[in-house]
Image: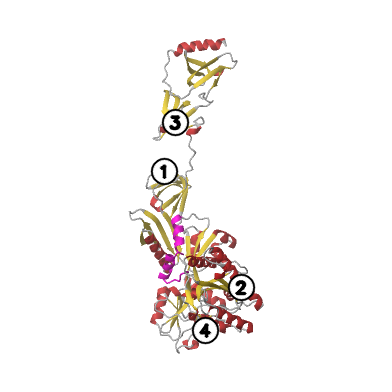
Amino acid sequence: MKQLIKTLATGLLASTLMWAPPLRAQDATVTLRSLDLNFEATGVLVSSDNDFFVIRTVIGEMNVPRAEVECIGDACPSESTEVTLRSGDGSSFTGELLGFDGSNYILKTTIGILTIRSEFVQCEGATCPAETQVAETDTNVVLRSGDGSSFEGQLQEFDGTNYILKTSVGLLTIRSEFVQCEGVACPDTGPAVSRFAIATPEDEGEAFVGETLARFVEEKSLNLTRSVGADGNISYLIGKNDGELVADITVIPAHDNASIEALFSHTAVFALTRETFTPQMISQVTGMSASEVTSSLESRPIALDALVAQINPENRVNSISLAEMGDILSGYITNWSQIGGDDAKINVYILDEADGLSQHIQRDILTPRGLRISSAATIVEDLGDLSDAVVDDVYAISISYRSDTHGTKIPSTRNSCNMFSSANTFSLQTDEYPLTMTWNLYALKDQNIPDLAVAISEYFVSDQGQASAKAVGLVGLAIDQLPMSAQGERLLSAMLAEGMNAQGINAYRGYLAEVSAGSRLSTTLHFLTGSSTLDERAVADVQRISDLISMGVLDRNNLLLVGFSDSVGSFTANVNLSKNRAGVVKTLLLQDNIGHLQSDDIIAFGFGPVAPVGCNNTAEGKSLNRRVEVWIRGANQQSLQ
């Protein structure tokens, strides 16, 4: 203890000769207490090193051996107090942190004690005050281009034009206008630009997307610019009137399988296809299991089209059955006289077998009967050439998409039960034309889709989106009405298709009596196989019916829900089953339209297997027959029965 006091006396004398910059500390007061409790001094901590504390007391500055005392107070240094204060321009100061008052750091350096304002520097070191520390920034980002390709790495720099990205293959410099930055470290580059791609069939698909985008931007008071790239992709730029870019959309022309591949490879955020893909079909394209496809994919029906036979307008044939189509394409029927026409050779025009149309024809018309297209058929280049060939040749025939028939004649068709069906809008909407195709929009559930892309996908099924479908030759999903007087072909075919016993005849008469004064809505509600759960399109159609109800379109009318079944089982059981399914739809509509509909406004019927729209000797036909038709009838009109 005597040695400590002697040392302090010497230090006090020496301190009068020392100078230190004044401290601006909020509270740098400490107490130094000897380990044996025989010495204690209180003052402002001026500095400290590995050997001494320097404190300013009322009698002057004291140098106190660090090993002999305990420092008590918030300003006491920790065992390791070295920090670095780094400024924004890269300069730094390193030394012992003596104190921090909330605004200033007190730092002992090799050039003296410095007071440094905290807003100009970042403190780095274990003893930096907790309130000054900034959480470590995650610099990992993903730069994603409009076509779905991406680059991942640590963002090193952004100069306003280029991203400098550290990746596994080295530093990359990537121009910002071609990519979208994803990640917390992405800089604020101004208004976000939505960049995404849609894979869709060329011709109608691209035209459908383009027409929909044109209507979308007009409604939003935006501008649209279209250009075609060297790779054949179409670019649509959406911008504001002041020139600010809002979206960069790439449309990739591709057949259906390639569109699905583009979706699952993340090249596109949407796949717009001509037909409905089952999980098993997608499994064949992607190699994924059906359960994986089901869990990762979402879809919605967008529009309708169909495969049709097209012939020259001067050809007197008015109906060609599905079987006759197959026989003509495969070369078993070669003369028009074989199907009621002139005695003239049939000239068949087709596209290359690799084309999507040829694949659809093979699958839906030929393969079920084990047939192949005849080598005698003439191959033309594209869909437009098919129509042109038929227009130029009185005895020509081709199978094409309904939307691509221009200046030609479309005969009605017949299934294996000799049910007649024309490829008119109503038959497609009610799914009663046998070669109907549903356009679908597919997306992945876990994909990061820009908000604008989501808005456009929803616009496809809006009134304007459906008008776009009609404008390019497709059939929209909007619900229409058709009076009984315009449905003679279908009702006659149903009567002639299958033999009916007395029960069936009475039930059919009951059906006609109920609906004869009404109009049918262009929707047929189907159920998932073996259940009372509506399928995806039926769910959407129930919502469309509810929309009509909420708008007052169906005011002063009763809704008639007419259920039907296939012919498997007893007649009585099928009547009950069909009525129960109509009841399911009634319950859903009442739940959706509380305040708009009362139970008495909806009448549910069941007529079992009468009035079939498909052949009951095929699985597909049975599925079509298990349905609920929707009719409207004036509230004051009664059954004619």
Q: Is residue 500 visible?
A: yes
Measured in 3D between alpha carbons, the distance from the residue under mark 4 to the one under mark 2, in whole angstroms, is 45 Å
Magenta stretch: includes residue 15: no
> How far apart in space, not on screen, are marks 3 and 1 (Cα)?
22 Å
In the rendered image, the vertical position of residue 263 relative to residue 99, given as above or below: below
User: Within 10 angstroms of label 3, few (less than 14), some, or many (20 or more) residues?
Assistant: many
Pointers 4 and 2 in contact (C-beta within 8 Å): no
241, 580: nearer the viewer? 580
Q: Which mark is residue 579?
A: 2
Q: Earlier in the sequence, mark 3 or mark 1?
A: 3
* In this picture, residue 638 sits left or right of residue 92: right
**Magenta segment range?**
450-477
What is the three-letter code of the residue carrying label 1? Answer: Glu
- Verify CB contact (< 8 Å) between mark 2 and mark 1: no
Question: What colouring method underlies this structural image?
Answer: secondary structure
Give me the C-alpha separation between circle 3 and circle 2: 81 Å
Q: Amino acid at mark 4?
A: Tyr
Please name the predominant secondary structure of the magenta segment in the image: helix
The CA distance from mark 1 to mark 4 is 70 Å
Q: Could you tell me the amino acid type at mark 3? A: Leu
Q: Residues within 10 Å of mark 1 (few under 14, many from 20)?
A: some
Disc 3 to disc 4, C-alpha distance:
90 Å
Residue under pointer 3: 85
Which residue does the numbered mark 1 point to in the structure image? Answer: 157
Q: Please tell me which of labels 3 and 2 falls first in the chain.
A: 3
Q: Earlier in the sequence, mark 2 or mark 1?
A: 1
Residue found 58% across the figure and 63% down from its top: 290
Identify the mark at residue 332; answer none if there is no mark: 4
As drawn, the residue found furthest toward the front would be: 636
Name which residue lies at 43% across and 15% down: 18
